[in-house]
Amino acid sequence: MYWKKITVGATKDTYDALEILLWDLGAVSVTVTDASDNPIFEPPPGETPLWSDIDVCGLFEQDLDHEQLESQIKDLGFRVLFSEDLGDRPWEREWLSEFGPMQFGRRLWVVPDGLAVEDPNAVVVDLDPGLAFGTGTHATTRLCLEWLDSQVLEGKRVIDYGSGSGILGIAALRLGADEVWAVDNDPQALDSTRNNAMKNRVEERLRVCSPDGLDIDDADIVIANILAQPLIELAGLLVSLLKENGDLLLSGILVSQESWVESAYVEQVSFVQRRNDDGWSCLQARK
């Protein structure tokens, strides 16, 4: 069976009206993608935010009058960007077509469902891209994953503070860590972490909690991939979670904010490494 996909330009303010129109015209699916390059990080629970400028794709059966469809869309003030003929495929996972396995460092891979890597030495994290902050596609997460891949994690206790999707903690467990505490103040992030841990069969070594439920002070590694301001506000707490000679990994920092963040920690830890990617910085310190 063949289909026609019509892509229409819209904004978050006009999306609702356009979605209703596409369904009314006979669409069998409606999908939304970012029209530019503005990543959305972790949304509040129950919310599904949209980018400012979006591309909305309606999928229609081939036997409909597509010229008339496009005319009706244009008559209501929307801009048809392009249309194309498509063969049949598993549409429920079509949105993943732009994502493939991603390698971080020497061994670590993040792989969407249904895909695989041929490297027999690969350490695989099974995780679909999504809204949760941390799916490997953003520079802040890449920097943390590459660092984890470079470490010897066997026997280590790790805290992933601000876990989002849980990707960093799950990666640490897949790379051999004994135990990971995934901490987030967002119930949606904690649910995402639990689900992803079960998918990767590491849930027995994972502890998931809100900040109030964290009561340890002897972690070998603390990772906080959040943003500069909360990193500064949490400086005392994050350092207190580490044992002596433990490693602190701070990410989510613009390169221009490095010295600002460092100044909040410099009396408590020694910075040993700074790595940059696409305008973002990742700082490693030791207690």
Image (cartoon, rainbow, N blue to C red):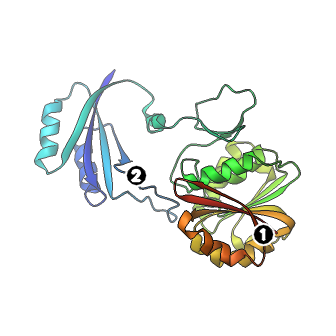
Percent coordinates x, y for residue 137 in the rendering: 54, 47
Q: Looking at the image, is 226 positioned above or below residue 84?
A: below
Judging by the rendered image, the residue that carries numbered circle 1 is 270
State which mark lies toward you, 2 or 1.
1
Q: Which residue shows up at 52% across the image and 53% down it?
A: 278
Q: Looking at the image, is 30 positioned above or below residue 67?
A: below
Q: Which of marks 2 and 1 is nearer the N terminus?
A: 2
Residue type of the residue flagged with mark 1: Ser
Percent coordinates x, y for residue 104 in the rendering: 65, 42
Q: In this view, does 38 lie to the left or right of 26?
A: right
Q: Give the image quarter of residue 120.
A: top right
Percent coordinates x, y for residue 243 in the rendering: 86, 68
Q: Which residue shows up at 78% across the image and 76% down it?
A: 268
In front: 226, or 44?
226
Q: How far apart are marks 2 and 1 (CA)?
A: 35 Å
Q: In which quarter of the image is the N terminus?
A: top left
Q: Give the image quarter of residue 275.
A: bottom right
Residue 120 appears in view: yes
In front: 223, or 89?
223
Q: Looking at the image, is 208 positioned above or below residue 30?
A: below
Q: Which residue shows up at 56% across the image and 70% down it?
A: 257
Residue 25 appears in view: no
Residue type of the residue flagged with mark 2: Asp
Percent coordinates x, y for residue 140 in the rendering: 59, 56
Judging by the rendered image, the residue that carries numbered circle 2 is 37
Q: Identify the element where label 2 is drawn.
A: loop
Q: Looking at the image, is 7 positioned above or below residue 20?
A: above
Q: Identify the element where label 1 is drawn.
A: strand
Q: Label 2 neighbourhood size at 10 Å, few (<14), some (14-19), many (20+)? A: few
Q: In this view, does 270 lie to the left or right of 137?
A: right
Q: Decide: marks 2, 1 in contact (CB < 8 A)?
A: no
